[in-house]
């Protein structure tokens, strides 16, 4: 890993300049640094929060648009709004290659920087919320999207397969949305214990999950396995949400007649869309899951020690490790 000096960006008329406060290190960055995704050179980081330090001429004093001094969570996903999925309102599935480029052409996701210019519409004010909470805006928006895809309704019984960072975000969200019972399934005894401490109604390993939890109205699969278990646990009229990334060869087997008779749905949930961001920013701003988010902060490093942050996430299980900008 190396640091590069880039020209300080200047916001266009409809943009704002954001000074980085914090950037979360996602599973994607872990895979890049570990060599599991050989895509180099690349400038990583896409879960960020910051403070608006300059606004474009078309944004200045525009009611409702972020202004200088406001803390924001930032959507770094670029959407072409032209391809088929975008035209149908499914911008999470945009066919255009996402991201930006540095001055030398290096591909960048935009997050591990001191400052970045982004479209004003991609920034969402978070009030006085902690900057680490605001940096979780992207994964929270992804989880909000997952709940939408599930058709989640208050009163549902929920099982979450995978007690990692995304599983715990799902757990926090379904709780505030009125789930009647929430279970977490994980192979790790420690993560089961921590989920229980955070409010899970039941926890179990994969072998005993069906017996412990019973049938579920919604099963979120946030781990890279557990597909057969998810289908086994879903109740009539329920849905299984495939949230995690999976092996391309993995399959989900549902008897066609059962899908017909029980109206069982298998749906995928990928990324997020603008309406998910609005909900995510409102949740962060309200503080309603602040305690949950505090529990998910594993470690913090200054930007100059980003290498240590990346080393940590590749060396042991973590929830979220953050890289923070250094004042001055």
Image (tube, helix red, strand yellow):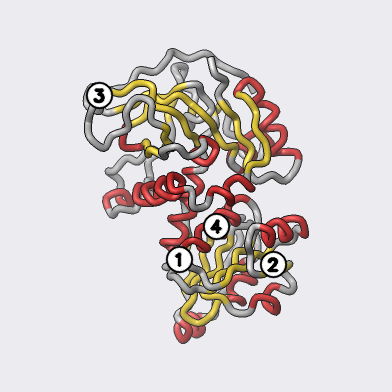
Mark 2 sits on what residue? 203
- Foreground tag (4 vs 3): 4
Image quarter of residue 297? top right
Q: Which label's residue is closer to the chain start, 2 or 1?
A: 1
Q: Which label's residue is closer to the chain start, 4 or 3?
A: 3
Separation of marks 2 and 1 at Cα, in angstroms: 21 Å
Separation of marks 3 and 2 at Cα, in angstroms: 51 Å
Q: Secondary structure at mark 1?
A: helix
Q: Secondary structure at mark 2?
A: strand
- Foreground tag (3 vs 2): 2
* Residue 272 shows in the view: no
Mark 4 sits on what residue? 172
Mark 4 touches mark 3? (CB < 8 Å): no
Residue name at image x 49 percent, y 61 percent: 176
* Residue 50 shows in the view: yes
Report crowding for label 1: few under 14, some 14 to 19, many 20 or more residues within 10 A (C-alpha): many
Q: Position of residue 327 (x, y in %)?
A: 54, 18
Q: Does residue 133 sit above or below 23 in this rendering? A: below
Report crowding for label 4: few under 14, some 14 to 19, many 20 or more residues within 10 A (C-alpha): many
Mark 1 sits on what residue? 150
Q: Which label's residue is closer to the chain start, 3 or 2?
A: 3
Mark 4 touches mark 2? (CB < 8 Å): no
Of residues 44 and 171, the one drawn nearer to the viewer in this rendering: 171
Q: Secondary structure at mark 3?
A: loop
Of residues 205 and 288, the one drawn nearer to the viewer in this rendering: 288
Q: Quadrant of the N terminus?
A: top right
Disc sitting over residue 13 in the figure: 3
Query: So how many labels did they put on this image?
Result: 4
Q: Which label's residue is closer to the chain start, 4 or 1?
A: 1
Q: Position of residue 128 (x, y in %)?
A: 45, 37
Q: Which label's residue is closer to the chain start, 3 or 1?
A: 3
Q: Which label's residue is closer to the chain start, 4 or 2?
A: 4
């Amino acid at each position: 890993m190396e640091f590069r000096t880039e020209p300080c960006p200047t916001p266009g008329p409809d943009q704002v300049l954001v000074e980085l406060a914090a950037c979360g290190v996602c599973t994607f960055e872990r895979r890049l640094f570990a060599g599991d995704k050989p895509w180099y050179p690349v400038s990583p980081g896409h879960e960020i929060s910051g403070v608006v330090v300059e606004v474009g001429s078309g944004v200045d004093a525009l009611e409702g648009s972020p202004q200088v001094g406001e803390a924001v969570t930032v959507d770094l996903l670029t959407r072409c709004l032209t391809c088929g999925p975008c035209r149908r309102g499914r911008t999470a599935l945009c066919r255009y290659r996402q991201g930006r480029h540095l001055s030398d052409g290096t591909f960048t996701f935009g997050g591990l920087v001191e400052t970045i210019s982004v479209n004003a519409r991609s920034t969402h004010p978070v009030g006085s919320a902690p900057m680490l909470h605001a940096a979780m805006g992207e994964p929270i928006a992804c989880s909000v999207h997952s709940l939408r895809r599930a058709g989640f309704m208050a009163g549902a019984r929920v099982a979450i397969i995978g007690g990692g960072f995304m599983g715990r975000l799902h757990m926090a969200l379904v709780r505030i949305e009125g789930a009647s019972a929430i279970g977490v399934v994980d192979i790790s005894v420690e993560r089961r214990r921590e989920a229980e401490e955070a409010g899970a109604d039941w926890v179990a390993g994969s072998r005993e999950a069906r017996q412990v939890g019973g049938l579920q109205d919604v099963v979120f699969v946030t781990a890279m396995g557990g597909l057969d278990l998810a289908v086994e646990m879903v109740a009539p009229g329920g849905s299984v949400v495939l949230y995690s990334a999976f092996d391309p060869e993995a399959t989900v087997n549902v008897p066609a007649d059962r899908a017909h008779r029980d109206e069982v749905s298998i749906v995928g949930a990928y990324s997020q869309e603008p309406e998910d961001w609005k909900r995510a920013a409102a949740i962060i701003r309200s503080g309603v899951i602040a305690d949950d988010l505090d529990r998910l902060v594993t470690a913090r490093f200054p930007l100059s020690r980003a290498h240590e942050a990346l080393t940590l996430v590749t060396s042991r299980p973590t929830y979220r490790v953050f890289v923070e900008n250094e004042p001055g």
